[in-house]
Amino acid sequence: MNKARSIKQNPLPDALPNFRNLGVTLRILLICNGLALLLAMLQASAWGEVPQRMMQVATLLAPVLLTSLLLLWLAQPWLARIPYRLGALAVSALAVALTLATYRFGGELYQPPGFADAGFGAVRHSLLALAVSAVLLMYFRWRSQVLSRALHEARLQVLRARIRPHFLFNTINAVLSIVRSDPKRAEAALEDMADLFRMAMVEPRELVALDKEVALARQYLSIEELRLGERLKVNWDIADMPPDALIPPLILQPLLENAVYHGIEPQLQGGTIEVRLYRLRDELHLEVRNPAQGQASLHPNGHKMALSNIRERLSLLFDVEAQYQVERDAEHYQVHIIIPYVKGQPA
């Protein structure tokens, strides 16, 4: 089977799902209960027996499933460090061990009087636990490969967005206008633009430190200041920003680009972009707010590819734990992104 490749054309390694992710937990619950319903239907001889059979299956499934989810949540840091095959073996062994323990200590609940062979029942339930584990692992491995291809396409879209003509031409024209009067500033602007293109080539699954993303955003704004001058003002509220937080690359810069394109350029007098980055409990918040007056007349269609790309990447990387909220009124437009707080490793 061909593995999905990144934008660097390196195969992305197999990895266990993040058992601390809410989306992963919900999918495990749905798949296990769906398999339990299928087993109940196979054991029943009529529709009326299905609820009773489902209750019998659930009496063993519920304690095993909930205990497994709790233990996997606790073991997630260790599972993230070991090879995929060893992790898959550990997950399967945990499911079988919990099933056997529950079956053994459940007494007559799982071994009613007159049950012919308790050993056969233990083997049967162990095989069922192993089969369910295999189905879940195969599903998440398949989903990881599909998402790898989707992330690859998303990164290509980011790269195309960075090279779109209006941004490239505006930057070149701005540099040409000062290349003789202020050559050092022109050189710095070209270096900033090179950094933007370089960041677009970052590995799809790689997360970057928030302080580096902020530095890149400041580089982008310095480029825009070449042509907008005093019309562009930025208010940074980052006192509560955790600099070691990890986020997907090129999340903040496209938001600022959209704010400049729609909020500042249409205003003859310019305006102020407000950026607020902060941590609230286990969540990281990114807010970008810009003026909204007059933007419809200058850019009626807008450029939504970059923002749609952000929503897509957040959904692929963080599942249901990521939120993308837009608030709009007569004077302001605000994007509010909420993602899990992931702390980076110390250098």
Image (cartoon, rainbow, N blue to C red):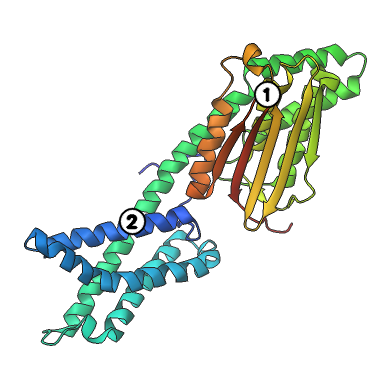
Residue at image position (62%, 16%) is 296
Which of the two residues, 239 or 198, is positioned nearer the viewer here? 239
Across and down, in percent, residue 290 comes to: 71, 29
Residue 204: quadrant of the picture: top right
Contact, mark 1 vs mark 2 (Cβ under 8 Å)? no
Across and down, in percent, residue 219 comes to: 78, 32
| Label 1 element class | loop
Across and down, in percent, residue 172 comes to: 75, 15
Marker disc for residue 292: 1
51 shown above or below 171 = below
> Quick one: quadrant of the N terminus?
top left
Say whether residue 204 is visible.
no
Across and down, in percent, residue 212 comes to: 73, 43
Residue 133: quadrant of the picture: bottom left
Comes first in the chain, label 1 or label 2? 2
Marker disc for residue 30: 2
> What is the distance, in whole Å, between disc 1 and disc 2 at their CAs?
43 Å
Nearer the observer: mark 1 or 2; the answer is: 1
Residue 55: quadrant of the picture: bottom left
Q: Is residue 184 left or right of residue 323?
A: right
Q: Determine the residue located farthest toward the right in the rendered image.
A: 181
Q: Amino acid at mark 1?
A: Ala
Residue at image position (77%, 39%) is 215
Say whether residue 95 is visible.
yes
95 shown above or below 315 = below
Q: Is residue 63 left or right of residue 276?
A: left
Residue at image position (59%, 48%) is 339
Marker disc for residue 265: none
15 shown above or below 304 = below
Q: Determine the residue located farthest toward the left in the rendered image.
A: 45
